[in-house]
Structures are given as C-alpha cells and as structure tokens.
Image (spheres, rainbow, N blue to C red):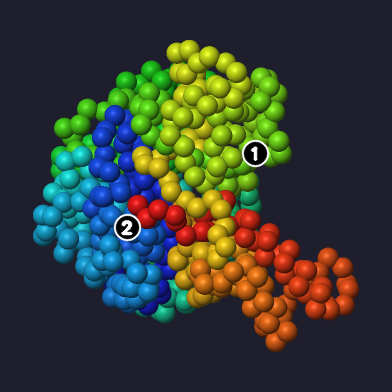
Amino acid sequence: MSSRYDALPYRGKAYPYAHPERMAAVGALFGLRPPDIRTARVLEVGCGDGINIMSMAYQFPRAEFVGADPAPQAILRGTLQAASLGLDNLRLIEAGIEDLAHDDVPFDYIIAHGVFSWVAPAVQDMLLDMLGRRLSSDGIAYVSYNALPGWHIRSVARDLMDTVVDRQAAPAEQVQAARSILERYADELPESALHGHVLQTIRDMLREHSDAFWFHDFLSPENHAYSVTDFVTKAGQRGLQFLGEAELGDSMLDRVPAELRHFVESETDRLRREQILDHLSNRSFRRTLLCRQHHKLSFDALPSNMANLHLAASGFPEGDVDLADDVEARFVRRDGERIIVANALVKSALKILCDVQPASVPHEDVVQEAARNIGISLDSDLRENLEQILLFLHGAQLIDILPAPRSVRLDVSEKPLVCRLARWDALQGEYPVMNALHSASAVTPFEQLLLVLCDGTRTIEQLIEVLTDAVDTGDLHINTSTEQELTAKVVRDTLVHQVQAALSRLPSVGLLEIDERR
C-alpha cells in the first residue's frame, strides 16, 4: 500500500463525518454516554498525510491524537506540517493495520475512513480485531466502506477500466487509460441502454475527482463492497454493535417514498431496516459507527437525548426572517440547497443559531429563547414538536448537533489573527483553505494573500499599507468598479473596501484563531 500512495500522493482533507464531534453527538442521540471529546484519545487508521486528524488536534488541544499510515512520505509531510503548526498533542506514526493490531492501549474514538474496502479481506479482519481489542468501553469507532447494493452498479465502470489498464504502468498512465475508456464508452453508448446510462452517470461523477482519487479508489487492486448486514455481522464477532450512521439523515425515513414508508416503519429490527433503506436508495457508500455490545441503545435517535447537547447553524437565512406563523422563510445550506420553514417557533430557533454562527448554543437555551422571542409559553407538546423538527433539520444538514460547546471568535481584533491551519494552507498556495471548524473555506486570491498577512502582528491599517506596497510593485492587481485611473487614492479606497469586506467574512466561516483553546 505504501508504494502506491508514495507513487501518487493523496492530498488529505477534513472529513466532517469522520470527526469525534459528529461520532459523539450521534452516540448521545441513541442513548450512549460517549467520552468527552475535549480530553479523549483518538486514533485514525490510514491517516495519509494527517490533514483530517491534524484539524481535530488543532480544535482540541487537551485531547490526544495518533494518526497511523504505512506510507512514509505521507507521514513525513504531515509530521513536518504538524510541527510547524505547534500541534504537540498529535503523533503521526508510520504503521499499518497489522502493526496496530499488536497493541492493547485503548482509544475512545477510532477512525478508519477510506480503508476497509481497499485492503485485502485478511487485513479487514485485522482491522476489526483491532477495533474489538482497542476501543474503550464507551468508545465509538467509525468505518467507511463501499456498500451494497449500490456498488454493484459502480463496479461496472471499474470492471471496464480493468480491461485496459496496465497495472505495471505509471500511475498517471493508468488513470489516463481509465479516463479514456470510460469517456469513450459513455459517449458512444446510447443513454437509453441501461449500461450506457450507468456509465454516463459514473463518468459525470468521476470527472470532478483528482487523478489520486481514480488511482486509489477505483483502480485500487483491492476494492470490496459489503452489505451493512454482512459488515455489522463481522463487527459483531468482535464484540461490537451497530450504533448508527455518521450522517444521521441517511437513516431518516423522510427520504422514503410515502407509499413505502409504512413498510419501512413496520420493520422492528434496526439492521434489517437499514438494509431496506440501502436497497431503496441504492446506497453505494456507508459511514458506519460501532460501539461495544454491552450498551443498550434506543431504536431511533431520540429528540429527548438532545438535552445536554449543543446546536449550531449549518446554513443562513435568505433575507430577513419574519417570525409570524405560517409565513415562509428560506434557509440556505452550505451546499446551496434551500429549506423552507413556516413554523414560527422553528424559525425563531433557527434565527438564534444563525445570528451567532458559527458559534454553538446549548440546546435548552435555544428552546427557551425561541419561545420567548415569539411570546409563547412552551408546553410539552410544543417542546416535543420543536425538538423533532430540530432533529430533522440536523438530518437535512441545516443544523449541527455537537457534544460540547464550539468555541470560536466572532469579532475581528485590532490585529487580526487567522487560524493557523488556514494561514498554512494560504502560504502553501492550497485552495480551498482549512478553517477552525474542521471544514474547508473557499477564498479569493486577494483573501488568500490577506490570510497570510493576518498573523496577529499587524493592525488593519498596517495590512492596508503592506497591500498598497504590493500593488505598487506589481505583485498584487486590484479591480475597481469603474475603469478609472489607479491613483494612490483610488488604490487605497479600493483596498480599504476589500480588506473590510474580507475581514467581516472571516468569523462566519471559522477563519479566525479560536478564542479559548479547549
């Protein structure tokens, strides 16, 4: 495995679903009492260059993080970056699954993203054995894998690629051969033919991905898919049970056609219901959470289990929010999808969260303040209905549910200080940049330069002076709203406006250094 990943490096990124914050919140909703993520021990198996776990270590300096990967060059890159960022609570080690299997030191959260389906079955067994031995009593494990039945369809494209790819060729040549054959077949086969439609769909999906994704995912020598029942059965042989999916919305019944919902609701076995949902959605990928079998879990995620959790907005209102009942308000998710809300109490709760985003608010505070803001008394029925809808909106990706407060800076200081992760990425020319929320933020070239300069040593006026000098030397080009001559005054006025606009955006996207190191 190491030679493949060193031959064609796979640049890491943050995976929001593969985060102890998400894992602990899902666990709590099903009645588990997960370890405190702020002081937990976390292991990531197959961490690559460590970007995913590095972001977590930045967020939670009192927790202990270990990332393991057999690719030496990836571990070296990550180690150098972690040292530059001052992350002394993170260790990156060159180790494969077989190395980790011989140690008994427990971890509260174990993450294996993009590993299970891409190793040999014997190594899969080692991974599950390791989880069974090293997961702490109340811990949670995350394992992603290609899922059936959906992967059956994607395997059509993989089998086609296998007919032309020379496994001895250089990685770039293998990817080019795979891209070419898929493009050719997808273009020439009629969409009316089932296999033609399948190949066109996969071609369109893969066009957006890098060569590294093609090489390590679709062209990996090992690529195995499992039904959720088969996977959980294997985990059960190691004393583990199905906790839920990291993306709670994947298991919610609102996505089931109304005509079939009663059939799904009547299923009394959680795992069989999950398998039915997979067949209805033709799911091809799962992010499954596991915990110890001695825990008694609720059948569904319960709104009543939100009592000690925290909520944060994962979107924003489109225009002003009218809190009158039955007046529609539109809220936009991070991916641009819109959700319409008319219920006054729900709109009030969402407005509370949106007004302070990306900070979080304790669940109980949201519930009580939402009722006060529209002048109503909160009885048990109203509370239950609100909590049900908030849980639904979490599944709809409009609300984040968190096990602990999210500490962020909401105001720009006299000497702006951008989070270290973002400044590192900006300095390296990476795009988008990592923020303090374990996600990526898109930035303009101008903002990218500004991020590098916002290291806490310059006032806003000094930032403008540095940028003015960059314009004078030709290192920075600015655009004005009109074709006026770039006099010193025009340059300054333009820079003042652009700097103020960029700085005002930084808090809402988590690009400022965290106030309180947790």
Q: Residue at x 47, y 37 (%)?
A: 361
Q: Please name the residue shown 45% across and 65% down the image.
A: 421
Q: Residues within 10 Å of mark 1 (few under 14, many from 20)?
A: some
Residue at 18% across, 34% down: 293
Amino acid marked by disc 1: Pro
Q: Which residue is mark 1?
A: 317
* CA distance separating discs 2 and 1: 33 Å
Q: Is residue 278 left or right of residue 292?
A: right
**Where the N terminus falls, by quadrant?**
bottom left
Residue 504 as seen in the image, left or right of residue 271: right
Q: Earlier in the sequence, mark 2 or mark 1?
A: 2
What residue did someone put label 2 on? Answer: 61
Do the residues under discs 2 and 1 have CB atoms within 8 angstroms? no
Above/below status of 176 relative to 298? below
Neighbor class of circle 2 (other Cα within 10 Å; few <14, some 14-19, many 20+) is: some
Callout 2, which amino acid? Pro
Residue 236 at x, y percent in the picture:
19, 39
Q: Position of residue 16 (x, y in %)?
A: 43, 50
Of 181 and 210, which appears nearest the observer? 210
Nearer the observer: mark 2 or 1; the answer is 2
Residue, x 11% and y 58% (percent of image)?
103
Relative to the observer, which residue lies in front, 358 or 288? 358
Q: Nearer the viewer, residue 178 or 376?
A: 376
Which element carries disc 2, helix, strand or loop?
loop
Residue 115 image offset from top left, x and y in percent: 31, 57
Per the image, label 1 sits on a secondary structure element best described as: strand
